[in-house]
Amino acid sequence: MATNFARRSFLRTAVEAFIEARQRQASAYVNNVLQSLDDQTLRAHGYNRAALKGRPDQADRF
């Protein structure tokens, strides 16, 4: 992996890091919204509250 990192340009590495950070932020946002739903709605869409609590939230970004 170190050789691949050395071959990438600075701009590409920066863009990939930005995209990864935004994906984590979006995932945390969706998780928070899902946790705000009631249990019946979560079950209807195939989620359960215990699994959602195990996912990272906004505090894990920093």
Image (tube, helix red, strand yellow):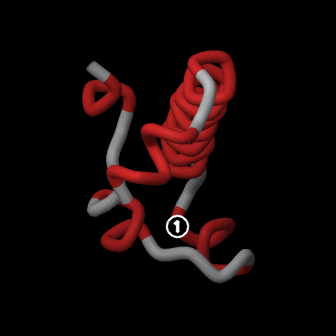
Badge 1 density bin: few <14, some 14–19, many ≥20, Cα 10 Å: few
The amino acid pointed to by label 1 is Asp
Name the foreground residue: 1 vs 42.
1
Q: Is residue 10 above or below residue 48?
A: above
Q: Is residue 33 visible?
A: no
Q: Is residue 11 above or below residue 58?
A: above
Name the foreground residue: 48 vs 30.
30
Residue 52 pos. (x, y %)? 41, 62
Which corner quadrant of the image does residue 5 belong to?
Answer: top left
Residue 31 pos. (x, y %)? 52, 47
Furthest residue toward right: 45
Which corner quadrant of the image does residue 33 belong to?
Answer: top right
Say which residue appears at 65% left-offset and 82% top-offset: 46
Disc 1 target residue:
39
Which corner quadrant of the image does residue 47 belong to?
Answer: bottom right
Say which residue appears at 67% left-offset and 28% top-offset: 12
Q: Is residue 9 visible?
A: yes
Whether residue 25 sits left or right of residue 57 in the image: it is right
Q: Quadrant of the N terminus?
A: bottom left
Residue 34 pos. (x, y %)? 58, 50
Name the foreground residue: 23 vs 27.
23
Say which residue appears at 72% left-offset and 79% top-offset: 44
